[in-house]
Image: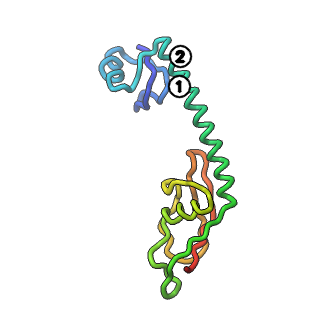
Amino acid sequence: MKIILREDVPDLGAVGELVTVKDGYARNYLIPRKLAVKADTKNVHQFDHQKRLIETNRAKLKGIATDLAGQLDKVSCTIPMLVGEQDKLFGSVTTKDIEEALGQEGIQISRKQIVLEEPIRNLGVYTVGVRLHTDVSAQFKVWVVAK
């Protein structure tokens, strides 16, 4: 039986592939679990249409991410923090603080997209990475200064 995979199936194929499997495997396992659909002409045309829509949407999102990466390369944000003796910070600078600082600069990014190896605990200038898309990432400078 020929089927179209709706999800990745290990040792069988990836989403959108047209594969041939035994009738019982398709009828008893793949189709009831909504991992695949039977590959008749209607389903093939419908899946091709959905695939084109998804690819168009991905390209659009990648373009937006590329534009945002260009903006981020020009940005540097300053985060004032309370310091104690020997310029040690009270607390640390986390992705939440960086998200708020970028918001003040007019750039809206989720803190989940900010790549910070570990929280910043000292004054100075740091380069912070941002993962905007699977193929697009950017870096910008963060200045941690005494309040």
Q: Report the amino acid beneath label 1.
A: Gln
Q: Which residue is mark 1?
A: 50
Q: Secondary structure at mark 1?
A: helix
Residue positioned most to the left? 28
Q: Report the amino acid beneath label 2.
A: His
Compare marks 2 and 1 and give the one earlier in the sequence.
2
Between 59 and 101, the one lying in front of the other is: 101
Residue positioned most to the bottom? 85
Please state the horizontal and vertical placement of residue 2, each as a whole percent of the image: 44, 15
Q: Which residue sits at x=57%, y=56%?
A: 130
Please state the horizontal and vertical placement of residue 53, each as a whole percent of the image: 57, 28
Q: Which mark is residue 110?
A: none
Count of numbered circles in the view = 2
Which quarter of the figure has residue 13? Answer: top left
Q: Which mark is residue 45?
A: 2
Relative to residue 126, is residue 11 drawn left or right? left
In the image, residue 99 above or below residue 30? below
In the image, residue 30 above or below residue 120? above
Q: Which residue sits at x=57%, y=54%?
A: 108
Q: Which residue sits at x=62%, y=58%?
A: 106
Between 99 and 48, the one lying in front of the other is: 99
Q: Secondary structure at mark 2?
A: helix
